[in-house]
Amino acid sequence: MSVTIDITGLPHERIVFCPSPLAELANSLHALSEPAHHPGQHAWTTTTAAALEPGLADRLHEADFMWRSTRSDFLIPAQPRETLGEELDDIDRLDDEKFVGSALEISCSSAHYGRGLPSPLVDEHSRRRALDLAAARGPRQAAFVARVLADPAGMRAWIRRLLEDCDEAFFGDTWRRVRFQLSADARHKSELLRRKGLAEALAAASPALALEEDDRGSRIVVDKLVQGRTSARDTAVTLIPTVFGWPHLTAVYGPGWQPVIHYPAAAHEVGGTPPVDLVRARVEALAHPMRMNLCRSLARGPYSTSELADAHAITAPEVSRHLAVLKKAGLLTTQRRGRYVLHQLDFPVVARLGSDFLESVLR
């Protein structure tokens, strides 16, 4: 079985490889809700979930049907923007019927998705189906879907606030790490498309993607456990690389939506694989007992140099020297608050060193 995208006559200029902050945020939320699907992101999901503010965690649980087993279509934009805010603005421009239909896309079976169902806002059967399937997932999801159907505008604003709060709490820093990797992947595939053709670019993106050409025309074939068909002759095709989405390959091909393929980028772990010299520097930085003690403090929150000096009964210059070593190894983040510079352990980085170290500093 497969999803087929008809691209007969479509100029290659309208086949675009481009990263999307919204799509990557959706995949990171999926990884948080289904960590077993993403063993390569275990360190990130563990540390991020542990640091979530309880209210934010509750709201994510309430809405997680939009990304847990699939992605609501509006979370994978056909026209990626530079910032998450711009992509959320595009969602705000959708009319209520399209927004609700895409938000509750989970209510469509694979057999219905390609043909489309009427919006739950105007069709009683679609409405009952959405409510029944949400109820099967639990009372919170049922209440959430009921609220979406009763107040689309209010819930659209609620979802936007939720995604913005995720960006502030954890995704903003994560996006700064992965966007260069995703941009490089997209540039590489774009160059392959330009120099060697679409077949080579698709094969480099995923072995599940192929180009078929015959006397009937040209088609992108996506190897999926569903049967579907759509056309991009009058629109375009967007291919979005993802780190958090690996190993999943997602295709948007519903009626009324420009086709989008969300494919795993070449490296599967957040930030890629660090150079051996950097790993050695991190291990050596942590070998000193005082730096290990400083890390135990910095794991619990941000501290200034003078606070650390008082806590560990050493001088401020000594603290500064130890912090310089930790910072050079990429183990710290810093922020300025007024005249104070605060230091904190960089959890995603140290988690990749191993769970034993993480447990030791959080003990």
Image: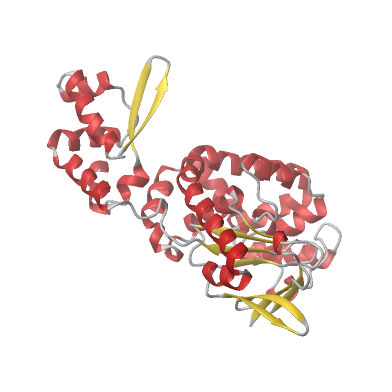
Give the total number of marks visible in the rendering.
0
* Residue at the outermost right position: 122
Q: Quadrant of the C terminus?
A: top left
Residue 158 in sight? no
Whether residue 21 is situated above or below residue 224 in the rendered picture: above
Q: Quadrant of the N terminus?
A: bottom right
Residue 299, horizontal then vertical, whole percent: 30, 37
Q: Quadrant of residue 281?
A: top left
Tell whether 156 sits left or right of 306: right
Residue 276, horizontal then vertical, whole percent: 25, 53
Residue 140, horizontal then vertical, whole percent: 61, 54
Q: Residue at x 19, y 40 (%)?
A: 285
Q: Residue at x 44, y 62 (%)?
A: 38
Say which of 58 and 43 sits in front.
43
Whether residue 216 is situated above or below residue 315 in the rendered picture: below
Residue 169, horizontal then vertical, whole percent: 49, 39
* Residue at the outermost bottom position: 215
Say which of 164 and 339 sits in front.
339
Q: Residue at x 72, y 49 (%)?
A: 147
Residue 192 in sight? yes
Tell whether 130 sits left or right of 26: right
Q: Residue at x 30, y 46 (%)?
A: 350
Tell whether 113 sits left or right of 34: right
Tell whether 36 sits left or right of 146: left
Whether residue 115 is situated above or below residue 301 in the rendered picture: below
